[in-house]
Image (tube, rainbow, N blue to C red):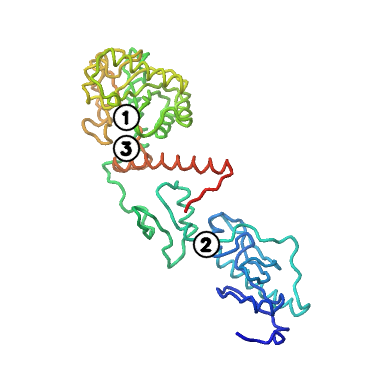
Amino acid sequence: MTFDAADWSSTLLVSFCTGVIVPASILDALQGRAINIHPASKDFPGRDPHHFACYNGTEEYGATAHLMTPRVDAGTILREKLCPVGPDVTPGELRQLGEKCGQDLYQCVVTEWPKTGNLEPAANLKWAGRKSTRRDFVELCRIHPLMDEREVEKRIRATRSEGYTNLRMDVGGRTFALSEVDEHAGQASEAWVDFTEDSYRGMIRAALSRGYEFSSYRDRSEGPHVLWRHDIDYSLHRSLRLSQIETEEGVKATYFVGLRLPFYNTLEKESVNILKEIVSGGHDIGLHFDAGFYDIEWTAADLNARVSVEKQIVEDNVGVELKAVSFHDPTAGNMMAFDAPEIGGLVNAYGAPLKESYEYCSDSNGHWRHKRILDVIESGEGRNLQILTHPGWWLPEAMPPRQRIERAVMGRARAVMAQYDAHLEKSGRQNIAD
C-alpha cells in the first residue's frame, strides 16, 4: 500500500469491534491519531474478554478507549467506561454491555477530539491482567473428569454462547464436543431410592420408633438394641456425612476403617481429621481387616498377631481408640471360621456370640442381595440387630451401584489434583497444563 503521509495529517482513525490489525506504517503516519475501542474493561485485554470476565466473576464491566500500537490492547488508555454487574451475569450480557459502553466511548471520542486535536490519557488507568488469546479460550472450554463440580459449573457458565458448542472434553486420546442436556434425563430408577441420605435417615428413625437402643460393641445394652455398623470400603467423606446424620438423630454407630484398602489412605492427614471428627460426634472406630492382603493360610495365632499390629498402627497414627474388628470380604479365605469373641484385642464383629444372638442384615454391593434393612427393622423379629452399611452406597441422590463407586473414585482423584494445584500455588511454582 502506498500513501502520502501528508494526506493523513488531519485524519482520526477509530476502530471498534473489528478484527483488522492496522499496519504499523499507517499508525506511524497517523502519529497518535489512531484509537481502538476495546469492548471490555482494562482488566480483560485480548480475545473473548466477556468469557474470561464471566469466569473470573467480575463485578464491573464496560469498554476501554486506547491509542493503537502494533501490539493489540497495549496502547495508552484514554478513557474507560464501567458499569456494575451482578453475580449471575452471562457472557452474552457482558458482551452487549461492552458494546453499549463502547458506543458511548465512541461518541466521546468523536465529540472531544475535534475540540483539542487530541485526548489526554486518563490518569491512573493501566492495562491489568493477562492478555487472553484464542488458545486461552480453547483451554477455558476444556473440561475433564478430575475437575470438581464448582469448576465445571464455572466453565459451563463462562463459555456458554448461543449458537455455539464450545465445551470440549478429552477422553481416550480424542476430543469430544459437549452440549448440555436435560438435567433430569436418564435419572436413576426407583430401584435405587432406598440408597439415599433421606432413606438412610428413615431407617434410623424406624429403629428408634421400634424401641431399639443404639449400642456399642464394647458396652452392649441389656435391652433390645442395635449394633449399627459401617465397613468403610470406599469413602471416608461419605462416612463423615452419615455420622453427621446419626449425630443429628441422637444415635451412635461404629465405623470400621481399613488400613490396606485401595480407595483411601487412612493415614493421610485429611483422613485422620475425618476420623477424629466422626469420633467427636459420639461414634466409635473399629478396624476393617483385609485378610486377603497377606495371601497366607491363616491360623488363629497369625490372625491375632496381624490384627493387633494393624490396630496399633491405626491407633498410633490416627490417635483414636479402636473398639472392634470386622473382616473385609469375610467369605473369602474362610474368615467366617474365625469366630472367637475377640481377635487382636478387639471385639470380633463376626464372633460366635454376635452371630448367635443378633439378627444380621447388610447393604452389601449396594443392592438388596438378601433382606432389605428397613424390612428387617420394621418386622421386629430380632430382639437385637447388627446392621451393616457401607457409607459409599448412601448418597444425596439415587444412582446405580457402579455409578456410586465412580463418584467416590472421582471424588478422591479430584481431591488429589486439588492438593497438587494447591502445593504449586503455595510454592510459587508454575502449573503447566498443556
Location of residue 316 (image quadrant): top left
Asked which secondary structure carries label 3, the reply is helix
The amino acid at mark 2 is Pro
- Number of labels in the image equals 3
Q: Is residue 46 above or below residue 195?
A: below
User: According to the image, label 2 marks what residue?
Assistant: 91
- Density class for disc 3 (Cα within 10 Å; few <14, some 14-19, many ≥20) is many
The amino acid at mark 3 is Phe
- Density class for disc 2 (Cα within 10 Å; few <14, some 14-19, many ≥20) is many
User: According to the image, label 3 marks what residue?
Assistant: 195
Do callouts 2 and 1 mark residues in contact (Cβ within 8 Å)?
no
Q: CA distance from mark 3 to mark 2?
A: 39 Å
- Residue 14, given in percent of the width and then of the height, sits at 65, 77
Who is closer to the viewer here, 212 or 393?
393
Image quadrant occupied by the N terminus: bottom right
- Residue 237, given in percent of the width and then of the height, sits at 42, 34
Q: CA distance from mark 1 to mark 3?
A: 10 Å
Rendered image: mark on residue 389? 1
Rendered image: mark on residue 295? none
> Tag 1 or tag 2, which sits nearer the N-term?
2
Q: Nearer the viewer, mark 3 or mark 2?
A: 2
